[in-house]
Amino acid sequence: MQSLMLDDLDRRIVHALYVDGRAPFSRLAEVLGASEQTVSRRYRVLHQAGIVRVVGQLDTQRLGQSDWAVRIRCVPDASMSVATALARRPDTAWVQLISGGTEIFCAVRSHSERQRTALLLEQLPSSRRIVALEAYCLLHLFVTASNAAPGPAEALSPEEIERLRSSHAVPAGQPGTSIQEEDWELIRVLAADGRATYRQLAAKTNWHESTVRRRMDDLVASGVLYFDLDVDLGALGIATRAMLWMSVAPAKLMEVGQALAGHSEVPFAAATTGSTNLVASVACHDDHALFEYLTREIAALDGVTHMETALIIRSVKQNATVGPGFPSATP
């Protein structure tokens, strides 16, 4: 992703998209106090520069499926090629080089249990370039990037946030809503561009625009479909990111997870299986800010018995966006 200096309006647009990734430019302009033409033009610049991308995502837990995370240690000089191969897969997200570039962290979001099993039990373990692998199931998500903007991206007032939230309310969906075979083309298009127009979606799915709108409303209202952002955090002033693996006393796990969810530095936290029971990512202005966060907020949490910290050296892939210099993943 390219570096671009963002001004106040740019930051407000990014924060607004965290609140409602599909808000019409007219609505964004009304809340942000700028002209629709200006907001539209600014968004196009941010999008074309690789600063921001809205992506449609499925809540796999609502679909009765499991998300997994994988931590991989490679032989010297192999981590980049392994990470690039993982990024090409449509069932991976957040492929990141950590620990000085010798390790890889990634999420696996396979909608096929057979494909996930083949990846975790056969393909990865059989690679001679991989010397250690730990796969763990994400049992409970306390916070994801879609829940709130990272601290440096927070640019809207509580009143502006509420105006945006109230503007995109949809009728209550069916609790048992599930993905149908005919939904997959719609989902694939939204994964590539969460702001695709209803006309564009209708052309891709061969549905009528009204059918697309009704189906999206149903999926969103049921919680099965939501919209997240892939953002160049460096453009928002975030220079230091890290992964935390924490061991927490079981009786305190919910309390600690909920506390992390309230920290603006934490865009992701989940209870997991494995050698530790809580994993989180942290985004800070710089190394000193990370030190301050670890020695103050984390140190104050009751129940944490052990913690390992690993800096994120490079993001190869976010939710769906592959970084510059890497082959594109198939949406």
Image (tube, helix red, strand yellow):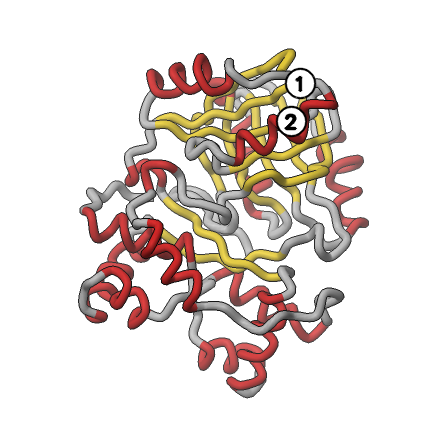
Residue 141, x across and y down, in percent: 63, 40
Residue 5: percent from left, percent from top: 20, 42
User: Circle 1 sits in a helix, a strand or a loop, which is it?
Assistant: strand
The residue wearing badge 1 is 247
Q: At x 37% / y 27%, what residue is drawn?
A: 284
Task: From the image, tell me which residue sits under label 2.
Answer: 278
Q: Nearer the viewer, residue 74 or 114?
A: 114
Q: How many marks?
A: 2
212 up-or-down from 290: above or below: below
Task: Please state which of residues 164 and 81 is positioned toward the viewer in this rendering.
Answer: 164
Question: Residue 106 placed where, x, y %?
Answer: 59, 36
Does 69 appear above or below 249?
below
Q: Which residue is depicted at the point 65% across and 43% down?
A: 108
Image quarter of the C terminus: bottom right
Crowding at mark 2 (Cα within 10 Å: few <14, some 14-19, many 20+)? many
Asked whether, in this view, residue 43 is left or right of residue 189, the answer is: left
Residue plotted at (67% across, 32% down): 271
Under mark 1, the amino acid is Ser
Residue 178 - label? none
Examine the image and state in which quarter residue 240 appears. Answer: top left
Disc 2 residue type (three-letter): Leu
Decide: few, some or many residues near mark 1? Use Cα within 10 Å; few <14, some 14-19, many ≥20: some
| CB-based contact (under 8 Å), mark 2 and mark 1 | yes
For this orientation, the residue located farthest to the front is: 159
Of callouts 2 and 1, the N-terminal one: 1
Q: Secondary structure at mark 2?
A: strand
Q: Disc 2 to disc 1, how far (Cα)?
A: 6 Å
Image quadrant holding the N terminus, namely top left
Q: Is residue 43 left or right of residue 308?
A: left
Taking depth in this image into account, of 147 and 204 the one nearest to the observer is 147
Residue 218: horizontal and vertical position, in percent?
62, 72
